[in-house]
Image (cartoon, helix red, strand yellow):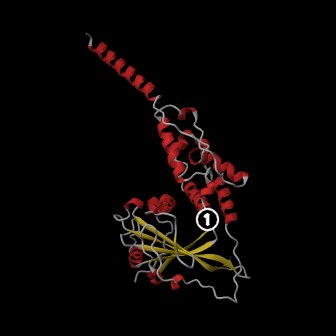
Amino acid sequence: MNPKNLFTKKGSVILILLLLCLIGIQFIRPRLNNPPVTADLDAPPEVKQIIERACYDCHSNKSKLAWFDQPAPAYWLVRNHILEGRQALNFSEWDKLSKDQQKGILYESVNQALFKEMPLKQYLLLHPGSEITDKDIAILKNYLDTLAPPKVKPDTSATIRNNASIVTNVRPSLNGIPYNAEYRNWEAISSTERFDNGTLRVILGNEIAVKAIKEQHINPWPDGAQFAKVAWAGTIDPEGNVHTGDFKQVEFMIKDSHKYASTEGWGFARWRGMQLQPYGKTALFTTECTNCHKPMRDNDFVFTEPLRLATK
């Protein structure tokens, strides 16, 4: 037999087998349901239109598959993305989140879009209409700004108690991280504000973090580096100057690449209010932290660039 004909025959057999396999896997279709909507996101039309267009296919119970999403194995990938997306954030179950959680999730979502983390790049290749533009981000940020509590004028006749150290026997965070009151003796390395909730924040670093900044060894940060981010409500005086008001919370980031490998090498903890209540319902609250910091993976997951400290 002519070797060329044999090769052609084998190629035809392989092609037929691949075609049969492709046809066969079309019958392997785990169900993808759209459960009932319990409470949808309530937002202005221009905001809702952006979020529905860019997010709802993977983050709601209103998923719509395009024709090219239907054939397997594309169907399997899309289905997994949708199920994972709904687990992380589901706009069709908006009532399961508190008002603060809703604002936090929206802030996180805008950050994800700002840093081009969402929508996923591979998703945009086939769904270019879901792209979030700079104009869209401006609209979303303006909306979040309307959700922030107004900056109230402080009562100068009253003493504002910003020192949360008066609380004793503070319970550990739900993931086991203990409260560390020594952060008050750490050095301030930066400051920031959250436009969505009207808070002013100061970031403090422990000795290891400060040493790393001075030596410019901050990407990655060394194990043992710790940050405390202290947040106060913003207030405005009669002259229009913004000041810190009531204490809101303190949150920690602790670098230990081995102990906290499952959360990007960082341990996260947060205590809220003057009574320093541990944040979250379960230890899985750290998922919120890692999702929020994910866009900064190239900066070792740290958002705020430290102010340069003079070398002693």
Q: Residue at x 39, y 65 (%)?
A: 220
Q: Confirm whether residue 186 shows in the render.
A: no
Determine the residue located farthest toward the top in the rendered image: 1
Badge 1 local density, few (<14 within 10 Å), some, or many (20+)? few
**Residue 120 percent location from the top left of the image:** 52, 47
**Residue 125 percent location from the top left of the image:** 53, 41
Nearest the camera: 61 or 257? Answer: 61
Nearest the camera: 113 or 19? Answer: 19
**In the image, residue 243 above or below residue 294:** below
Q: Secondary structure at mark 1?
A: helix
90 left or right, relative to 15: right
Q: Residue at x 41, y 65 (%)?
A: 266
* Residue, disc 1: 100
**In the image, residue 36 above or below residue 3:** below
**In the image, residue 216 above or below residue 88:** below
246 left or right, relative to 296: right
Q: Residue at x 72, y 54 (%)?
A: 44
Q: Quadrant of residue 253?
A: bottom left
